[in-house]
């Protein structure tokens, strides 16, 4: 029989992964035999090396390490509370000695990722009591997981898991940390400072406000905020930073902007925290912030704050902007587009997304005219709950400026049957028609998704040529070759077509791979669109 080490490394990994997946311990949350994994690692002598490496690489929680301790030290207590499921806690029956941690030290150096700090996910739920962490802090190894790369922690801060406990988990190898805090107002700054001291090579940091935690304090409408500290700039290798639900104050934003390697930023902001000078000052482009930023995600009340902040971002490689705003209008979006058209990253920007009300109706012709200066655009998505108004001329200009366009999602309006929907189009005078779709079909071969309110009525559908007596739309809408079309999804809004046969012919010529057109409420039955129903029947034939 050949030795296991003669097999290729990838085969060994698959064998060990199979053992881990098939073994009961991975599916029952340790409820059958709490020491199974340790016993498996000890008794599989032939596979001892690779088995240890694979089985201990990723742990669901801290419990496997606790099970390496002597049985008379680490015990499980069951508490019955009412008629619900009993609660189980891991506790220490006595104070540990240095010898008790011999197996902990042996296995902990193999751990690279812990999914949950203190609790199992599968029933029955087992929680590590705070007393255990307190004992580990005073009597355990100096670093509980010395080679860990990724941590996911919840309920951090306050009385439950104070800084003295959580910093035991910070190692010099930690590169990915997800932190959910009950009271970030008081606990975020000291925890991040300790992280900067113990884990200077951190590359990904995701912080969120755990407002559902029992440790959460403060009034219901309270929103935590943070200014961080100067020590935050010690994260010289940080590439991805997410701080969600915790409002970022100006000093914190400036500290983030000073990070030399930051590529992805996801933050929550309230514009009232920023002085008027933030929007009126003229930043020096040579001393700006965020020099390597590629992706910006912002939750903000006022969209104009984003336009002002973009002027402080000096990155020439900004590719993606995703914004969620609560109080904005289409003129604020127009101002944002104007700033983007002049930004030093205009050659790189390819993805723009906005979610939030922009007014009703929403004429964005001027805004999209600014965006024509961005040649790399592939994806534009606006979830505005408004009727986005674009003219055929604007669509044609977009199609020529964005030849690599893949997704144009501009329609999320919920139709009110009591509203004069068609009056919005006639009053705005900028409705898109089949002519606008034709420009996109011919000039954007990579376009896969198109959601846009259009008026399907067109003069070419009503007339015939004098010589051949053929429908005029045959000449007005040139067919697109199948190898020059990628569109698989089209949504056209709430205006029904009066000429379903002709419209089906036009759409089939422009988008040869399309056999269905989404419209109205997507056939949920609230409204009737007999024209589009007939057009789709023709397309499917």
Image (cartoon, grey):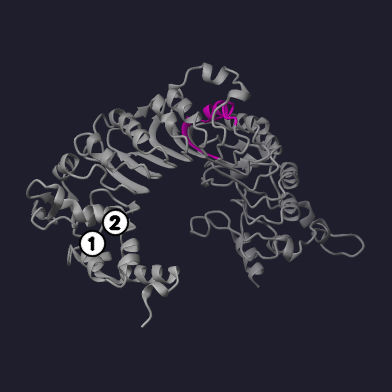
Q: Nearer the viewer, residue 314 or 230?
A: 230
Query: Is residue 462 shown above or below 10?
Result: above
Q: Position of residue 125 (x, y in %)?
A: 19, 56
- Pointer 1 local density, CA inside 10 Å: few below 14, some 14–19, many at least 20: some
For residue 502, side relative to residue 224 (left or right): right
Q: Secondary structure at mark 2?
A: loop
Residue placed under numbered mark 2 in the picture = 60
Res 162 seen here: no
- The image quarter containing residue 334 is top right
- Pointer 2 local density, CA inside 10 Å: few below 14, some 14–19, many at least 20: many
Residue placed under numbered mark 1 in the picture = 29
Between the C-alphas of marks 2 and 1, the distance is: 9 Å
The magenta-colored residue range is 295-314
- The image quarter containing residue 202 is top left
Q: Which mark is residue 455?
A: none
* Residue 404 is one of the magenta-drawn residues: no
Furthest-bottom residue in this view: 1
For residue 127, side relative to residue 279 (left or right): left
Q: Nearer the viewer, residue 405 or 466?
A: 405
| Picture quarter with the C terminus | bottom right
Q: Nearer the viewer, residue 137 or 241?
A: 137
Residues marked 2 and 1 touching at CB (< 8 Å): yes
For residue 32, side relative to residue 307 (left or right): left
* Residue 297 is one of the magenta-drawn residues: yes
Q: Position of residue 28 (x, y in %)?
A: 23, 65
């Amino acid at each position: 029989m050949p030795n296991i080490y003669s097999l290729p490394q990838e085969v060994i990994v698959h064998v060990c992964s199979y053992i881990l997946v098939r073994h009961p311990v991975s599916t029952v949350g340790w409820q059958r035999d709490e020491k199974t994994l340790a016993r498996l690692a000890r008794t599989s002598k032939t596979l001892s090396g690779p088995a240890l490496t694979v089985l201990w690489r990723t742990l669901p929680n801290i419990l496997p390490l606790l099970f390496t301790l002597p049985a008379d030290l680490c015990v499980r207590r069951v508490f019955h509370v009412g008629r619900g499921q009993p609660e189980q806690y891991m506790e220490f029956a006595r104070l540990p000695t240095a010898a008790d941690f011999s197996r902990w030290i042996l296995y902990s150096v193999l751990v690279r990722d812990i999914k949950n700090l203190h609790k199992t996910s599968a029933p029955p739920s087992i929680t590590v009591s705070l007393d255990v962490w307190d004992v580990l802090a005073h009597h355990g190894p100096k670093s509980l997981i010395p080679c860990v790369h990724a941590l996911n922690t919840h309920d951090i801060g306050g009385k439950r898991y104070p800084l003295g406990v959580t910093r035991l988990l910070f190692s010099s190898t930690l590169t990915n940390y997800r932190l959910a805090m009950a009271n970030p107002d008081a606990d975020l700054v000291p925890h991040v400072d300790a992280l900067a001291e113990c884990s200077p090579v951190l590359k990904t940091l995701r912080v969120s406000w755990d407002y559902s935690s029992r440790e959460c304090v403060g009034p219901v409408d309270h929103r935590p905020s943070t200014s961080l500290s100067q020590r935050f700039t010690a994260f010289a290798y940080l590439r991805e930073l997410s701080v969600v639900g915790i409002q970022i104050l100006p000093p914190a934003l400036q500290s983030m902007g000073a990070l030399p390697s930051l590529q992805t930023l996801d933050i929550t902001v309230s514009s009232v925290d920023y002085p008027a000078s933030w929007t009126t000052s003229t930043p020096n482009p040579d001393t700006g912030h965020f020099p390597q930023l590629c992706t910006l995600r912002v939750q903000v009340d006022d969209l104009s704050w984003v336009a002002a902040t973009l002027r402080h971002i000096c990155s020439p490689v900004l590719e993606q902007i995703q914004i969620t705003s609560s109080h904005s209008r289409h003129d604020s979006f127009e101002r944002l587009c104007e700033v983007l058209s002049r930004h030093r990253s205009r050659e790189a920007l390819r993805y723009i997304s906005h979610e939030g009300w922009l007014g009703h109706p929403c004429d964005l012709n001027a805004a999209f005219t600014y965006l024509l200066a961005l040649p790399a655009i592939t994806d534009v998505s606006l979830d505005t709950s408004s009727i986005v108004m674009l003219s055929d001329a604007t669509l044609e200009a977009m199609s020529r400026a964005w030849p690599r366009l893949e997704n144009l999602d501009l329609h999320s309006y919920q139709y009110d049957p009591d509203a004069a929907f068609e009056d919005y189009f006639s009053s705005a005078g900028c409705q898109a028609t089949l002519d606008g779709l034709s420009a996109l079909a011919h000039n954007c071969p990579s376009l896969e998704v198109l959601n846009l309110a259009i008026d399907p009525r067109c003069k070419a559908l009503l007339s015939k040529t004098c010589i051949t007596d053929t429908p005029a739309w045959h000449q007005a809408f040139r067919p697109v070759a199948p190898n020059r079309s990628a569109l698989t999804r089209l949504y056209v809004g709430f205006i029904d077509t009066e000429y379903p046969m002709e419209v089906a012919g036009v759409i089939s010529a422009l988008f040869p791979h399309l056999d269905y057109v989404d419209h109205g409420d997507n056939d949920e039955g609230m409204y009737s669109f007999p024209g589009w129903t007939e057009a789709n029947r023709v397309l499917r034939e």
